[in-house]
Image (cartoon, helix red, strand yellow):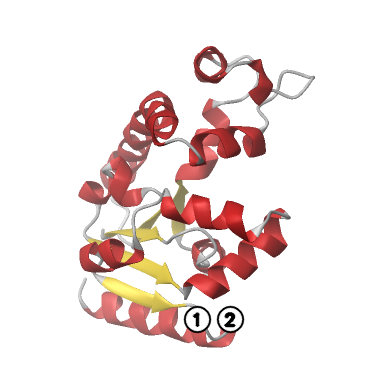
Amino acid sequence: MKVIGLTGGIGAGKSTVSDYLLDKGFTVIDADKIARSMTEKGSETLQALTEAFGEDILFTDGCLDRKKLAAIVFSDEKKRLVLEELTTKKVVQIIEEKITGLQEEGYEAPVFIDAPLLFESGADKLCDAVWLVDASIDIRIRRVMARDDVTSEEVKRRILNQMSSSEKIARSTDIIDNSKGKEALYEQVERLLERYAETK
């Protein structure tokens, strides 16, 4: 069983690749979904986040306002590190437990870890290979502005607070270019799947 990390900077299109793999029947362990389940209303993690960042990060019903939390942590490196300390280590531990469970069941197909902070969290150490989804800065900015209804300055701040594309490229096994539309993107994914199937 190969474990393949799937990552990419904001707006690169990692989630599009992740959805494609799910549609093809692959197991995808989604780090963001794990983090969301950990920060549900009434959870210990949400309580710790509220203590660290204040009640402004909550909606009136007590649920986490992810946009407000993102705005706080993406504009302050120290606060981003606090967030990682409170959530990221637990997420990686849960991912590791899921992988171990699949191995014990004798699962043989590739398993993907979908994680925007794959390298920053250390989850890449669980992987046999890493696929990086990448696109030009301009394309990424336009996508996130349209998706999240934010200004280009806010997107640029988020990008600057993430590991640089050049560092991610240097640490990745394979690069998937998502600058030319979904058809070209899926063709690259298919080629990689074929290649990895040949090297079981």
The type of residue carrying mark 2 is Lys
193, above or below 95, in the image: below
Please identify the residue farthest to the front as the structure is shown.
153
What residue is drawn where x is 64% and y is 25%?
Answer: 57
Residue 200: name its quadrant: bottom left
Question: Which of 78/132 is in front?
Answer: 78
For residue 37, which numbered disc appears in the image?
A: none
Kindly state the secondary structure of the residue where label 1 is placed: helix
Which quarter shows the N terminus?
bottom left
- Near mark 2 (Cα within 10 A), the count class, few <14, some 14-19 or many ≥20, is few
Residue 189: name its quadrant: bottom left
Q: Can I make out residue 105 in this image?
A: no
Q: Can I make out residue 34 in this image?
A: yes
Cα distance between the residues tagged 1 and 2: 5 Å
Q: Is residue 138 left or right of residue 109?
A: right
Residue denoted by label 2: 182
Place of residue 27 in the rendered image (x, y in percent of width and height, measured from the top left): 44, 56
The type of residue carrying mark 1 is Leu
Place of residue 99 in the rendered image (x, y in percent of width and height, measured from the top left): 32, 44
For residue 185, which numbered disc appears in the image?
A: 1
